[in-house]
Amino acid sequence: MLFDTVLRNVKIVNMKGEYNIGINEGKISKISKLKLEGEKLINPGESEVVLPGLIDPHVHFRDPGLTYKEDFHTGSMSAANGGFTTVIDMPNTKPLTNTYKNFSEKIKIGEKKSIVNFGLNSGFNTYEEMCKIAELKPTSFKIFMDLESDSSLNEKFRDLRRLNTELGTSFLVSCHCENRFIVHENTYYQKSKRENQSIDYSYARPSEAEIVSIKQVLDLIRKYDLKAHICHLSTVKGLKEVLKSPCDVSYEFTPHHIYLDNTYFNSLGNMVKTNPPLRSVNDKIGLKNINPECIIGTDHAPHTINEKNLGVWDSKPGIGNLECVLPLLLTEVNKGSLSLELLAKIMSENPAKRFHLENKGEILEGYDADLTIVNLKESGVINPETFYSKAKYSPFKNWTYTGKPTMTIVNGEVIMEKGEILKRDIDKTGEKINKYVHS
């Protein structure tokens, strides 16, 4: 049998020995130790390993309305260069992705511009509008707890329960967990000081705001029999609340909350401003908290460099991470502090299962041919000037790494090879290799 593409004599994570992978029509058709023939042959090097395509459940591609920061084309190129084959975009664009019309338009934008697979989260709206949006199968409904009162939160969770019951669906709610009252109270206090330093931002949105908000989410999903996903969980105490809960709740860690603490404000200033903010060493989650149940989400949130330099309170919160996270974590694999098998689980299998992305997250016959090939020995220094993202800055600038993605395959097509995007003109040609994915 002649396959469209064959990966020859490759090492596959979670499998012993070398295998051949035959790909036909965007699917993994055959995995065998026997020789396979293909129209295109790929021969990875000795230090390279094939992972299931990485899935990022939390990106902000700023499209539409804020495309001077990022758009689906540049964001998806950044994702591909970072080894990601699927991303899930957040709804806080302009206009908000919280109507049937706006959601439909964003699907069209993604299908035209994206070189990787993508899913979309929806914002909340009236119950009637959410019923319409449900037809388009959002990956989840996203809520920013810090923008809502207690009464409006109760109403929104109640509406989602009603929607799931009446439509026979099981949409989960993705939650940005910071308590509005605590943030407002502490921000007012910090602003009242005679002078402010960048680190004051972390005190304006303290760990308590996240912990209280997580408890509130757990209470609400228990009350309305919902399932939740906690975005960018940043505190050890917040994690403990989730782990002891009997509710159906998942959670993600970001690279900046894993690696950085709020003392980085002193050297990098507002470059590291993000929501929730970096935590103190005593409060923050870290590498030791990575476990087989967690998910890694980058919270890729680019801004212009000018927007990051507007001062403690006016500079925009957000960090771009798509092209940093895999080299950082592969470095931990080389150090022996993280296994490659666990990395594949938390960056591919877990998000695929949690967000019900069919035929993704594992390397199996019949699954989508979304694959990430990494070189475990290639070393270098993170250089934001080489990013495909419009945001050419990073708190991880000049961090050394050992291990990086060398090839990204989406639906059977090689779109990134050794740092070069091979499908970078997709938005001009109209060619489609990506898919809109949904639960």
Image (spheres, rainbow, N blue to C red):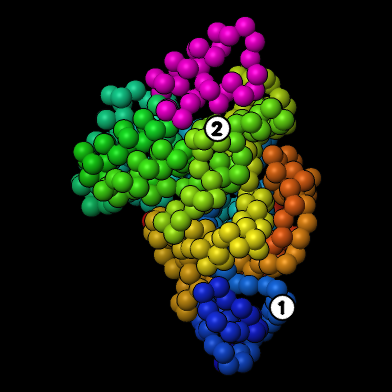
**Quadrant where the image shows the N terminus:** bottom right
Direction from residue 81 to residue 279 in the image, left or right: left
Residue 124 visible to an observer of this rendering: no
Residue assigned mark 2: 280
Q: Mark 2 and mark 1: span between their CA atoms? A: 41 Å
* Bounds of the magenta segment: 180-209
Q: Position of residue 44 (x, y in %)?
A: 70, 76
Q: Amino acid at mark 2?
A: Ser
Q: Is residue 335 visible?
A: yes
Q: Which residue is pictured at 54% across the width and 88% down the height?
A: 32
- Between residue 73 and residue 7, name the one nearer to us: 7
Residue at the (55%, 82%) spot, across then down: 16
Nearer the observer: mark 2 or 1; the answer is: 2
Residue 337: x, y in percent?
A: 58, 59
Q: Label for residue 46?
A: 1
Classified by dominant secondary structure, the portion drawn in magenta counts as helix
Q: Is residue 363 above or below residue 162?
A: below
For label 2, the crowd category at 10 Å Cα-Cα, with few meaning under 14, some 14 to 19 and many 20 or more, is some
Residue at the spot 65% in from the left edge and 63% down from the top edge: 334
Farthest residue to the front: give it: 282
User: Is 189 inside the magenta-drawn segment?
Assistant: yes
Q: Is residue 72 above or below residue 343?
A: above
